[in-house]
């Protein structure tokens, strides 16, 4: 199937859905391809207290669903699936959905976001889904009453630890440095949680486990203490990795300019890429702030720029 569109939005989340809201109100009749896990970073956030309009706070999935509903209400067409191929060499831009459907778009807004970064250990791969996770809100309930470890030192890691502490017996918060990068508010919250233990200056070496037939489970985490150079093992049943994110931009290599970390390069405070008519919004182009509200704002800007571009080039 082949179809033409004024505006194609690749990716959901606060950026994609907000772009949909503004593009719809501008009469661009946008088509939004949601991808495999819409709004991944916000949907794995258990409690959001800093998004305007929610004075009592709200769960990330709740906020995400309400933004999505608003985008649909004003006319954004949502479609499940994944963009598997793009050609930005000329307009209209060619985008292939799930390897079959072809969209020819006058403008494209890239809002593919970022995904969890992993440690890179072979044992991590072996036990992923069997005790190793990057989403406490997704998998935390499986470890109720058990001991677990969270690896990382930023806001996400400390939030994951605080969330898990509500249901787990003990949470080891493992960080490779002697100081956390997280906000002071998050550090204070974690420090006041009695069943969270800080394990500083420690680097994960191996995730330990056992296999019985097709059943696998995590039994421990081996750590290297940077100060003493000693190896220590903590007995746990789950490992939650929270060491940052990687922008989802593999699809755009060779099509758009990317920085050394893989983020799409945009022009100053504007969502313009090196290809006129292609715009980037949200975490896919923001290595600094990475907040839901800034992602939403950039989605707004991308849609406004798309409208201006079409007015000037039609």
Image (spheres, grey):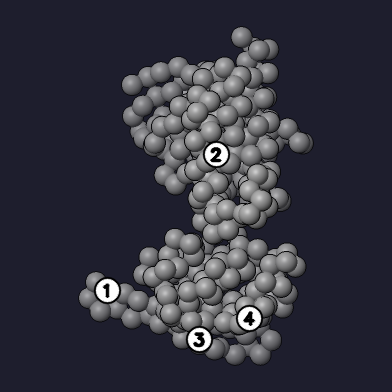
Going from N to C along the chain, the mark reached first, 3 or 1, is 1
Q: Earlier in the sequence, mark 2 or mark 4?
A: 2
Question: Cα distance, mark 2 to mark 3?
Answer: 41 Å
Provide the secondary structure element on which disc 4 rests: strand
Indicate which label's residue lies in the foreground, 1 or 2: 2
Quarter of the figure with residue 49 = bottom right
Label 3: which secondary element: strand
State whether residue 104 is above or below residue 158.
Answer: above
Mark in front: 4 vs 1: 4
Residue linked to disc 2? 67
Residue 198: numbered disc: 4
| Residue 55: x %, y % from top left | 66, 51
Which residue is labeled 3 in the image? 234
Determine the image quadrant of residue 187.
Answer: bottom right
| Nearer-the-camera pick, 307 or 225 | 307
Q: Which residue is mark 1?
A: 215
Is residue 123 visible in the rendered image? The answer is no
Q: Nearer the viewer, mark 3 or mark 4?
A: 4
The outermost residue toward the right is 268
Q: Residue furthest top?
A: 314
Figure quadrant of residue 132 = bottom left
Q: Position of residue 29 (x, y in %)?
A: 51, 20
**Separation of marks 1 and 2 at Cα, in angstroms:** 40 Å
- Residue 68, compared with residue 309, is above or below; it is below
- Secondary structure category for the residue under label 1: strand
**Which circle's residue, 2 or 3, is located before the other in the chain?**
2
Contact (CB < 8 A) between labels 3 and 1?
no
């Amino acid at each position: 199937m082949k179809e033409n569109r004024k505006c194609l939005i690749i990716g959901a989340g606060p950026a994609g859905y907000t772009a949909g809201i503004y593009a719809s109100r501008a009469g661009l009749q946008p088509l939004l391809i949601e991808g495999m896990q819409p709004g991944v970073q916000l949907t794995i956030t258990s409690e959001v207290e800093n998004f305007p309009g929610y004075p009592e706070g709200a769960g990330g999935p709740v906020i995400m669903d309400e933004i999505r509903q608003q985008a649909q209400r004003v006319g954004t067409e949502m479609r499940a699936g994944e963009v598997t191929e793009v050609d930005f060499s000329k307009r209209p831009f060619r985008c292939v959905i799930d390897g079959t459907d072809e969209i020819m778009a006058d403008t494209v807004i890239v809002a593919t976001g970022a995904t969890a970064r992993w440690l890179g250990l072979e044992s991590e791969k072996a036990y992923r889904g069997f005790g190793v996770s990057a989403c406490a809100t997704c998998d935390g309930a499986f470890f109720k009453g058990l001991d677990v470890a969270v690896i990382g030192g930023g806001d996400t890691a400390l939030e994951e630890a605080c969330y898990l502490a509500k249901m787990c017996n003990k949470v080891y918060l493992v960080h490779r440095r002697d100081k956390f990068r997280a906000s002071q508010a998050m550090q204070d919250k974690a420090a006041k949680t009695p069943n969270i233990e800080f394990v500083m200056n420690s680097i994960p070496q191996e995730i330990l486990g056992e296999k019985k037939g097709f059943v696998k489970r995590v039994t421990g985490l081996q750590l290297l203490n940077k100060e003493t150079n000693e190896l220590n093992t903590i007995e746990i049943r789950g490992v939650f990795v929270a060491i940052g994110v990687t922008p989802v931009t593999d699809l755009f290599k060779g099509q758009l300019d990317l920085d050394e970390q893989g983020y799409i390069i945009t022009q100053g405070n504007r969502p313009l890429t090196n290809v006129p008519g292609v715009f980037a919004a949200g975490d896919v182009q923001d290595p600094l702030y990475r907040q839901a509200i800034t992602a939403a704002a950039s989605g707004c800007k991308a849609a406004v720029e798309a409208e201006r571009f079409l007015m000037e080039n039609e």
